[in-house]
Amino acid sequence: MDYKISDNFKRNHFSCKCGKCNEAFKISLTLVGIIEHLRFKFNNRIHINRAYICGEESQFLFGNSKDYHHLGKALDFSIENTDIARCFEEVESMPEITGIGFVPQDNLIHIDIRDKEREIWLEERKEKIPFTPDKRKQYGINSVQQ
């Protein structure tokens, strides 16, 4: 059953897409609120690339079933007609987001709400690397003013 979760998003936007688990579903309402905020802020359609993934798919993709996507605490997305660097800056300004990945080759951003200290990274050629000041400059991203 596909029902509305919020004003702009339905259950299927957040459900597993592996094709084996009958679109299993779990999502933090905090993430739903964050994605609604971004939809309103940029006034453009949001494409959710990945949200919840089932245990079997998590094991296949990440080698374990305890990643943040499987816990319903992560999603990867892009915003139509919106510069990914501007979107990243907005996400970085939100303290409730404690995991942020910038993935320019796929034009998407990963966010999660981990129960740990904030981590921000860059993914280049499928490798997770520190998002250094030089890399920020390379991608035209300003540092967040604390």
Image (cartoon, grey):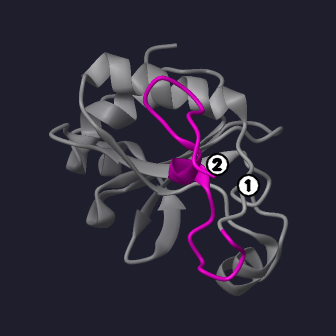
User: Decide: marks 2, 1 in contact (CB < 8 A)?
Assistant: yes
Q: Secondary structure at mark 2?
A: strand
> Which residue does the numbered mark 1 point to in the structure image?
68
Disc count in the image? 2
State which tag comes first along the sequence, 2 or 1. 1
In screen coordinates, is 100 left or right of 124? Answer: right
Residue furthest out toward the left: 81
Membership of 82 in magenta stretch: no
Q: Main secondary structure of the magenta part?
A: loop
Residue 129 appears at what percent x and percent y?
50, 63
Which kind of residue does numbered mark 1 sit on? Answer: Tyr
The relative height of residue 15 versus residue 132 in the rendered view (above or below) is below
Mark 1, secondary structure of its residue: loop
* Residue 15 in magenta stretch: yes
**Residue 12's x, y, as percent?**
54, 53
Which residue is painted at 47% across and 23% down in the image?
7
| Residue at (47, 24) in percent of width and height | 36
Vertical position of residue 36 compared to residue 131: above or below:
above
The amino acid type, in three-letter code, at marker 2 is Ala
Q: Is residue 35 left or right of residue 18?
A: left
The residue lying toward the viewer, choosing from 130 and 1, is 1
* Residue plotted at (44% across, 64% down): 123
Q: Nearer the viewer, residue 119 or 43?
A: 43
Q: Between residues 49 and 12, which one lies in front from this camera angle? A: 12
Q: Is residue 39 visible?
A: yes
Magenta-drawn segment:
1-22
Q: Residue furthest front?
A: 1
The residue where tag 2 is placed is 74
Question: In the figure, residue 95 lies in which quadrant?
Answer: top right
Where 85 sits versus 40, above or below? Answer: below
Q: Mark 2, residues whose alpha carbon is within 10 Å: few (<14), some, or many (≥20)?
A: many
- Residue occupying the point 68% across, 27% down: 30
